[in-house]
Structures are given as C-alpha cells and as structure tokens.
Image: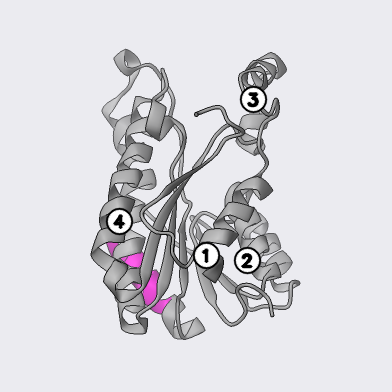
Amino acid sequence: MKLLEGKTALITGASRGIGKAVALAFANQGANVAFTDLRYDEIAQATEKEIAACGVKAKMYASNAADFTATAATVEEIAKDFGRIDILVNNAGITKDTLLMRMTEEQWDAVINVNLKSVFNFTKSVSAIMLKQKSGSIISMSSVVGVSGNAGQANYSASKAGIIGFTKSVAKELGSRNIRANAVAPGFIITDMTAQLPEEVRKEWAAKIPLRRGGTPEDIADVCLFLASDLSRYVTGQVIHVCGGMNM
C-alpha cells in the first residue's frame, strides 16, 4: 500500500517549483491532489495533467492565498469536490528583496500577506475540516532565513519566522484532536527563481554548504512526504531544516 493511499492533499502555490515537486511526490504515493495558484494558465494546466497522470484525482484552483474570503471559498469548494482534506501544505510565497533602508511599505506588506497571512488563511479554513475528521497533517514552508535572518530579506525573513511561531502554536492547539503541524525550512534550493542568479553567486552559496550543492525541489518534497504520512505520526510542532547543513 502506498504511503498516502486514499488521502487528499491541498497544496498552495503548486504550479511549479517546490510546490509542484511536493504534489507529484504525494500523487505518486496515492494521494489525490488539489492545488492552488493565482491563475489557471498553461503552466498550471500542464501541472494538473502531470499530477493526474500518476493515476489520482487532480484539480487546480485559481485563488489568491493572501485573500481571507477567497481562501475560505476555495477550501469549501475543494472539500465538496474531494470529500475530505487530510493534508495541507502551505507553500505559496514570494520575495521582494532589498535592504531595509530601501524597502517600501508595499514590498513589506506584499511579502507578509502572501507568505504569512496565507498560512493563517488556509490553516484556519482547513483546520475546521480536520477537526471534524479528528485527523490531519499541516505542513508549512518556512526557510533557514526565518531562523538565521539574511541581509536584504527583512520582509522575507520576518514572514518565514512568523510561520515557525504560528506552526508551534497550532501544533499545541490542535494536537489533542490528532492534527499535526510542522514546518520545513529549506536552504538554498535550485528552482527557476534561484537559477536566474549569476553563476558566481550560486557557486558562492554552494561553497558555504557542507554537502557542497544546492538542494532540489525533490529534496524538499521527500521531507514533506514523511511529514504528510503516518511515518511521522508522533512528530508535531517541529521545524525540519532541509539545507545540506548550511544552518547547523
């Protein structure tokens, strides 16, 4: 039997990158997958087909994760379409990096709303469903910079640190109902976004990592698979660093 056979996962921001890798890992282990992104474009359609090709039910929902009302409506629609939600992966996120002295209010608000408020929005709506089911696993994507900070990323670091505090609080609130909440803290992961960095910058990052390489979306997906499955049935309130040892 596959690790997630018969379960339904909801993954935010999953048309590409880490979110897509998580969706495919879950689908390959038997989970039906609902995923969100801002718009149902060609990339989202292709991801939807790729997930469905794993032999599971897959559906994409266009939704602004930072919008509380829109999120509630999306979760309600997903619950009707799939019948249940067993796993939530809060993955939606953006960056607007700049030094604090140059950072605008818009840059601060945008990152906090998409990265942190979205986690509140989806967790609040999905937890109501999980409470009725008396089971569930909530996984939120933090970052090593949410623990260590990083120059030029005050907004991003604050949003990812907030996710950690939120996750630990939710774990304590919902644990008695067999609902687990954990965070994953990726390090330097090779995605479309980081691939745009100059080669010398990527080499400099890799040189600082004990394993001497950037991570892959699949490295993150494998840890999420562990947290989503019953293999982690006694793990909650934790932050798992997936960073090749760069933040020890």
Q: Is residue 228 above or below residue 20?
A: below
Q: Which mark is residue 228?
A: 1
Q: In the visual, does 148 lie left or right of 60?
A: left
Q: Which mark is residue 209?
A: none
Q: Earlier in the sequence, mark 2 or mark 4?
A: 2
Kindly identify which residue carries mark 2.
26
Q: In the visual, does 112 lie left or right of 85?
A: left
Tag 2 secondary structure = helix
Kindly identify which residue carries mark 3.
210
Disc 3 residue type? Pro
Q: Nearer the viewer, mark 1 or mark 4?
A: 1
Q: Nearer the viewer, mark 2 or mark 1?
A: 1
Residue 63, position as x, y percentages in the image: 44, 61
Q: Earlier in the sequence, mark 3 or mark 2?
A: 2
Residue drawn at x 43%, y 59% as measured from the top left: 235
Question: Which quarter of the figure has residue 165?
Answer: top left
Disc 1 residue type? Ala
Of residues 43 and 89, the one drawn nearer to the viewer in this rendering: 89
Q: Which residues are magenta?
A: 67-77
Q: Earlier in the sequence, mark 1 or mark 4?
A: 4
Look at the image and name its color scheme: one colour
Tag 1 secondary structure = helix
